Image (cartoon, rainbow, N blue to C red):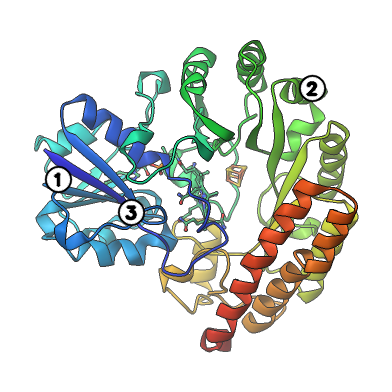
Amino acid sequence: MKIAFIEPSPVESNVYSKLHMPLLGPLYLGAILKQRGHQVSIFNENIYRPDYSKLDADLIGISILTSTSKRGYEIAKKFPKEKVIIGGVHASLLPEESLQYARQVVIGEAEEVIADIVEGRMKDPIVRGREVKNLDSLPQPDFSLVKGYKIPAMIMPVSTSRGCPFDCSFCSVTKLFGRNYRFRSAQSVMQELLTRRTGTLFFCDDNFTAHPKRTEELLKLMMENKINNWTCQARCDVAKNDKLLNMMVRAGCTTVCVGFESVNNKTLEAYHKKQTIEDIIKAIKSFHRKKIKIHGMFILGADQDSAKTVWETLKFAIKQKIDTIQMSILTPFPGTKICEELEREKRIFSRDWSLYDGQHIVFKPKLLSARELQLNVVRAYAKFYSLSNSLALLLGLRLRNAFFRFMGNRIVKKWVAHNRKMQWILQG
Ligand code: B12
Ligand code: SF4
């Protein structure tokens, strides 16, 4: 069969639109179906948008996040419903909604059911996927299937584990992959790394260091094979483990993306983040001592946050010399604890999924108005990425940081302009 997977671009462009990094789901599913003799292509709309009226496929598989679901449904409507299947985080959280646009929807991990669905042995409208217990049994994601994807790519995602033992109240990850942390063997990951041709590897595991022993094994192999220049997502906890941190440096880690989330201890508690502001400061010091750059991620808008918290976050990021930051507005993704709470209190005022991207306020915050939250976050963000700040870094010859700040400046400008156009939503 001819199968086309589609990863829709978000309707609202976001800070990541220019980062051409496909989700790995369609690449794993595509590799499995290709091995079974099907003809597979993957269209990532950020990279290449086909003319759908001419798309020659027997089956269309659409992969949706909440922010891309609106566009995903628009695409689905271009095809007869019996040709469309939908999966991904958002479809897993709201399968009944997605089913209005598809003949079948898959909840959760789809590798162990996709062939049965495509080949007609599984016909239920809503199929529950299965947690892949042995991740080494999966084929490598096949990037050659992505139309228009340039290899060597600037940055390439690699997944070495699934699930996260934590359960933060704003996060969708455990809803999709569960809290059971599963990981590939170091050898299997190494085999994949040796085939990747890229400037930077991005370990897109939600928590690369959740099981330090297994991470150590992988790092040892990476050192032996002289892998370098990679980024991972980790929690502050890792910085307490000096041995692991040293190994990460020797194995080529240049940047860590860390969910700091807040500079307000009460907010961290409400998020169930299981970390304190003291942990965050210590972690920043340890990473910087080892010359690892930090991309710090913050989420603003919890019931404990005021306008002051937004500016304290900015001050903190500057004072602690965090290299780059992401300031997101708290987003009640369906299925999360935060969403349940806000729904119960009838505080969500927009269910336009295209606004569920961390850049738009869709609920009434407690200590300030929706408008104030949105404007303060945009302004603080713009300040961090201001041209004068970027120039200062450039003059101090911190070239990498200056480059990313200039890039951030362009992105924030777009966000500010877009914000002016959408004043209507800020009435809430
Ligand atoms: C890499 C990554 C990114 C990259 C690339 C993302 C991209 N191309 O969209 C970057 C950094 C750019 C990014 C950006 C964002 N991300 Co992101 N990202 C991830 C991350 C860490 C890994 C994605 C991945 O490859 N997973 C591994 C593969 C195997 O999983 P999968 O793609 O979901 O596929 C499986 C199933 O879903 C299913 N499936 C998937 N597609 C299909 C299709 C069909 C037809 C079928 C049957 C099944 C199926 O089967 C697959 C195999 O089991 C996830 C977390 C996670 N663990 O998934 C967050 C995650 C997807 N991101 C998230 C968010 C919120 C964002 C942002 C809005 C920014 C932000 N504030 O963080 C932006 C929006 C991006 C956009 N497209 O608009 C949320 C999504 C929540 C939601 N409800 O939508 C997640 C889940 C993280 C979280 N903490 O909650 N992200
Ligand atoms: S935010 Fe990070 S630590 Fe918390 S549940 Fe999600 S992936 Fe795990």
In the rendered image, the quadrant that contains the C terminus is bottom right
Q: CA distance from mark 3 to mark 2?
A: 40 Å
Q: Kindly identify which residue carries mark 2.
A: 246
Q: From the viewer's perspective, is 188 left or right of 296?
A: left
Number of dots carrying numbers? 3
Q: In the figure, 310 relative to 323: above or below? A: below
Q: Nearer the viewer, mark 3 or mark 1?
A: 3
Q: Kindly identify which residue carries mark 1.
A: 124
Answer few, some or many: residues within 10 Å of disc 3's Cα (few below 14, many 20 plus, some between 14 and 19). many
Judging from the image, what secondary structure is the residue with disc 3 in? helix
- Ligand 2 quadrant? top right
- The earlier-in-sequence mark between 2 and 1 is 1
Disc 2 to disc 1: CB gap under 8 Å:
no
Judging from the image, what secondary structure is the residue with disc 2 in? helix
Residue at point 86% right, 48% down?
A: 397
Residue at point 60% right, 40% down?
A: 166
Disc 3 to disc 2: CB gap under 8 Å:
no
Tell whether circle 3 marks a residue whose Cβ is less than 8 angstroms from ligand 1.
Answer: yes
Q: Name the mark on residue 91.
A: 3
Q: Nearer the viewer, residue 263 or 394?
A: 394
Q: Position of residue 144 (x, y in %)?
A: 34, 34
